[in-house]
Amino acid sequence: MLYDFNFYSSLLLITFTQGVIYCLLLLKKGIVSENISNYWLSIFVFLCSMFVAPWMLGFAGWYDNQPYRDFMFYIPFQHLFFIGPIIFFYTQSLLNPSFKFNKKNALHLVPGLLYLVYNLYVFVYDKIIIKDYYFYQDGMDKDFDEWYQIAGKISMTLYFILSIRYYNRYKKMIVQVSSNADAVLFKWIKNYLIAFLIMLLLPHVFEVISHFFPSKNSYIGGWWFYLAYSLVLYYIAVTGYSNEVHSKIGFKMSVFNTKPILLLNDTSDSFQDEENVVDIDYEKEPEKKSEEIELWKQQIEMLIQSEKLYQDPELSLTQVAKKLQTNTAIISKAINQGFQMNFNDFINKYRIEAVKELFAKGEHKKSTLLGIAYDCGFNSKATFNRAFKKNTNYSPKEYLNTI
């Protein structure tokens, strides 16, 4: 098989091969862990690896020799209409364990499928019907047509915006329903979305560079873009493979409106009744405290204090609602309006008070600060320090100096 191993083709071959390897590793990890998010990331890494392939194979001599030239022409490598939806599906599957691919989601793939049909038509017409180049008279690969590249970038940008909006709504929701929100805010989500944004901006960056530092060979200039692109892809693949944090709270949420989010009983398609919702925009329209809110406040406080629920690092709004034999909507409203804080801050306040009590008893002389934090329900040093500073305006060590 023809392959000209040179500086340009060899470096891209390394990054391309690594992408394919991590695609298979993510696929295996998805099968073993039964976590659907790994499947979506595996597909994304594969599509991005294929995006680099034409430039790699072009420098290896495939565009200059038959039958490789026809293979490059008639096989679509750059699936720009698929990349955006796949990254959006990955975002949803990582944040929401109840996410499932359905007919509605399949509509997002229609533009990509239509492009495949278009490629099939080009192949049939050129190679079977007229047996000559018609669509390829200009000798240019259709993957690099200006209309397709522009439309593909627009598609990826739109899905990037949708992913950002989905993540932002998730962040508002998780502090309302989980007492360990910091653990499931997914720093990785933020990092890979930034990496994906870099992918979107790279063409513009290299366009500016080429304007100030023009290259005699445009193909060499393009090679630097694909090398940078593949390095960003390598970061996403490696870091995504090592990510082990997954959300356990299922929900139903739309990115196109601001309706309250509906929580799920489990990861099935069975939803709770419409009273079990969480309004993440409660602060926009504050309501006057009612007698009902005051009654629920008292019950919630008694429950948290008597059973020391705050000691459970994974305590959720749903658990509190079940213990009080009501729904999440009522408990969420009582905490938001009655205590003027979200569920995460509300539980952390009890944890901080418990820590301060242990400090007063001198427990910090017998145990480490982190050990005390764990005993009171915190599950990480960073979360403990952040919550303590927020509640007392002191770090734990500074607070100890005051007493």
Image (cartoon, rainbow, N blue to C red):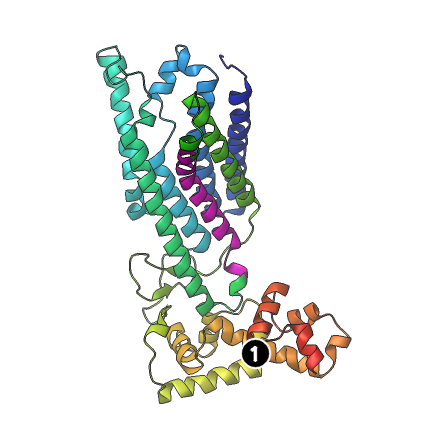
* Residue 159 visible in the current orientation: yes
Horizontal arrangement in the rendering, residue 393 relative to residue 189 (left or right)? right
Residue ID at (33%, 26%)? 144
Whole-percent x, y for residue 15 in the image? 53, 30
Is residue 202 one of those drawn in magenta? Answer: yes
Reply above or below: 392 against 8.
below
Judging by the rendered image, the residue that carries numbered circle 1 is 350
Point out the residue furthest to the bottom here. 291
Is residue 117 one of those drawn in magenta? Answer: no
Q: Amino acid under label 1?
A: Tyr
Residue ID at (53%, 36%)? 22
Whole-percent x, y for residue 114 in the image? 26, 33
Reply above or below: 400 against 28.
below
User: Which secondary structure lies at badge 1?
Assistant: helix
Whole-percent x, y for residue 278 in the image? 38, 69
Horizontal arrangement in the rendering, residue 137 relative to residue 362 (left or right)? left
Residue 210, picture quadrant: top left
Q: Nearer the viewer, residue 97 or 12?
A: 12
